[in-house]
Image (cartoon, rainbow, N blue to C red):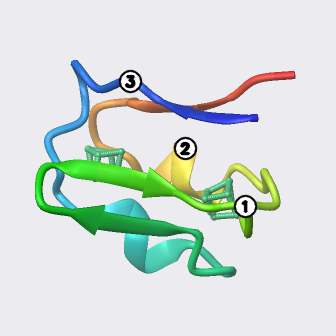
Amino acid sequence: MLTVNRYKCCYCGACVSVCPTCALELVETWLEISADCKECGICTKICPVGALEVEA
Ligand code: SF4
Ligand code: SF4
């Protein structure tokens, strides 16, 4: 399961543009993770503040 640390995320949008399934969306000051997430982990590597994590 992909989780976002709301305290770390600065809503830069970098993760949104790298997701191959377009599962991430910035909605005002909220990062939405949709059911389209395949837990590939690409977004976790691009996030500059380490706010995204794929957990078992
Ligand atoms: S883990 Fe992969 S599929 Fe899920 S939101 Fe991140 S980049 Fe997209
Ligand atoms: S890349 Fe990281 S800091 Fe930027 S919007 Fe995504 S989770 Fe937030």
Residue found at x 33% / y 51%: 31
Q: Nearer the viewer, mark 3 or mark 1?
A: 1
Q: Is residue 41 above or below residue 34?
A: above
Mark 3 neighbour density, 10 Å: few (under 14) some (14–19) many (20 or more): few
Q: Earlier in the sequence, mark 2 or mark 3?
A: 3
Question: Of the residues shown, which amino acid type is indicated by label 2?
Answer: Thr
x, y percentage for residue 54? 70, 33
Mark 2–mark 3 contact, CB under 8 Å? no
Dot 3 falls on a residue whose secondary structure is loop
Residue found at x 40% / y 70%: 16
Question: Of the residues shown, which amino acid type is indicated by label 3?
Answer: Asn
Q: Is residue 6 above or below residue 10?
A: above
Q: Earlier in the sequence, mark 2 or mark 1?
A: 1
Residue where numbered disc 3 is placed = 5
Q: Nearer the viewer, mark 2 or mark 1?
A: 1
Gap between marks 3 and 1 measured at Cα? 18 Å
Q: Is residue 7 above or below residue 51?
A: above
Does mark 3's beta carbon lie closer than 8 Å to ligand 2? yes
x, y percentage for residue 29? 13, 50
Q: Quadrant of residue 1?
A: top right
Q: Image check: 1 left or right of 23? A: right
User: Where does the C terminus fall, quadrant-wise?
Assistant: top right
Gap between marks 2 and 1 measured at Cα? 17 Å
Q: Is residue 45 above or below residue 22?
A: above
Q: Which mark is residue 35?
A: 1
Residue found at x 29% / y 42%: 48
Q: Earlier in the sequence, mark 3 or mark 1?
A: 3
Residue where numbered disc 2 is placed = 44
Does mark 2's beta carbon lie closer than 8 Å to ligand 1? yes
Question: Of the residues shown, which amino acid type is indicated by label 1?
Answer: Ala
Q: Quadrant of residue 12?
A: bottom left
Q: Nearer the viewer, mark 2 or mark 3?
A: 3
